[in-house]
Image (spheres, grey):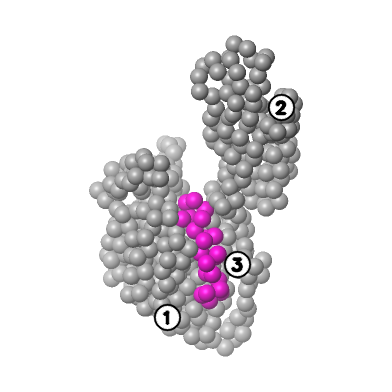
Amino acid sequence: MKFHKIYAALLFISPIACAKTLDLNLDKTMPAIEKFYLDLHQSPELSYHEQQTGQKIARQLKQIGFDVTSNIGGFGVVGIYENGDGPTVMIRTDTDGLPIIEQTGKSYASNVTITNDEGATVGVMHGCGHDIHMSSFIGTAQQLVQHKDSWQGTLMMVAQPAEEVGGGAKAMLKEGLFSKFPTPDHVIALHVSASVPAGKVSMKNEYTMASVDSVDITVKGKGGHGAYPHTTIDPVVIASRIVLALQTVTSRELSPLEPSVITVGSIHGGSKHNVISDEVKLQLTLRSYNPEVRLQQIAAIKRISQGIALSAGLDKSLMPEVYVHEDESIPSTYNNPEQTNIVRNAISSAIGKDNVLETQAVMAGEDFGLYGRTEQNIPITLFWLGGVEKSQYIAAQKSGQTLPSLHSSKFAPDYKVALPTGIKAMSNAAVALFNN
């Protein structure tokens, strides 16, 4: 992967090309950032409903001095700050919460409940740390404007909705994020970590997060009385055979050097003990890094499902239906090595080399990867911001207990440490890319 533009000449002519670590006076700004965080934490909004959150982000960016456009790709926000000639650096945050009832016991816990599209009452919580992301995002915007003498170019702040459902990045790109606004030369983001102690960050080059696909399989059959199975073709049995056979895709069809996950997360069929149904529904999640592996997974699912149905004696008119939710599909996140090395070095200088860890790729997914898959072939980098309170982390290491994960009702990041770390890391990473 190559950089979209080359600014090598700046290395020789710009007086700020070798900028030092920013001297951030966070003591003055952190009280307001923490207040903003607590407000966001207590007022989360679900995917595609982030209207108030978007307005809060827009107001903050306008106050800092950005040219702001709202309602891009839903309730997305784009802030542009021009500061002379140079590259365009895009910093992205996500804004949506999750349908979780918070059980952290914190005095500032979210008490928000809503009625969802199915008519059920659900809690709403920032269980994936997007409130940390947004607060760090605003803090970074403040610092970069205050230290604009340290960089030249265009700063592009993008607050993206609907990350949790894989739709926000697609919607913003479709609406012209890279055509109506300056096309970035670098795109960076952070994501809070539930396994790294606050005060540290972690990252890796190349693949860092997986592609994600949701797949439905509708298995058909010929129903009847449970006492006379020989007069039926039982879709429960067919579905069970499919579930087991799918486990051989990763273990026997794909290279053992290629990470792959095929999980059947839901199986529903039948209505009564003694009734053989006509239909069973399966819901799957697929994960991989290599796009070719993804295509192999999908092809194998279709082939295996049909083959088992045929072996059961079903007519071709009753073959299983395999539906891939392409609107929810997201690619893997690939950290451009050259750019990521620049980011790593800048963050190491800002917070100390010992506080920058190397991590492994995970099978979780993030639609951030889409920003690096456009025709412009823009380099992207996502790094992890430690969120675990230090004493809690040490205790867990000693006892072997599992820490609350992202998307847990008990996940509560140590925001007083994580936020200044995130602001220092992102601000210095951005300046390094401006001056590269």
- Write the start and end of the magenta stretch as one range: 162-183
Label 2 or label 1, whichever comes before in sequence order: 1
Q: Secondary structure at mark 3?
A: loop
Q: Residues within 10 Å of mark 3 (few under 14, many from 20)?
A: many
Amino acid at circle 1:
Lys
Q: Which residue is mark 1?
A: 148
At 54% from the left and 56% from the top, the residue drawn is: 367
Query: Which numbered circle lies on residue 379?
Result: 3
Q: Which residue is mark 2?
A: 314
Dominant SS of magenta comes to loop
Label 3 or label 1, whichever comes before in sequence order: 1
At 65% from the left and 38% from the top, the residue drawn is: 321
Amino acid at circle 3:
Pro
- Circles 2 and 3: CB atoms closer than 8 Å: no
Residue 286 visible (yes or no)? no
- Circles 2 and 1: CB atoms closer than 8 Å: no
Amino acid at circle 2:
Leu
Q: Is residue 39 left or right of residue 297?
A: left
- When the figure is inspected, residue 88 is found, relative to residue 174, above or below; the finding is below
Q: Nearer the viewer, residue 136 or 98?
A: 98
Query: Which numbered circle lies on residue 395?
Result: none
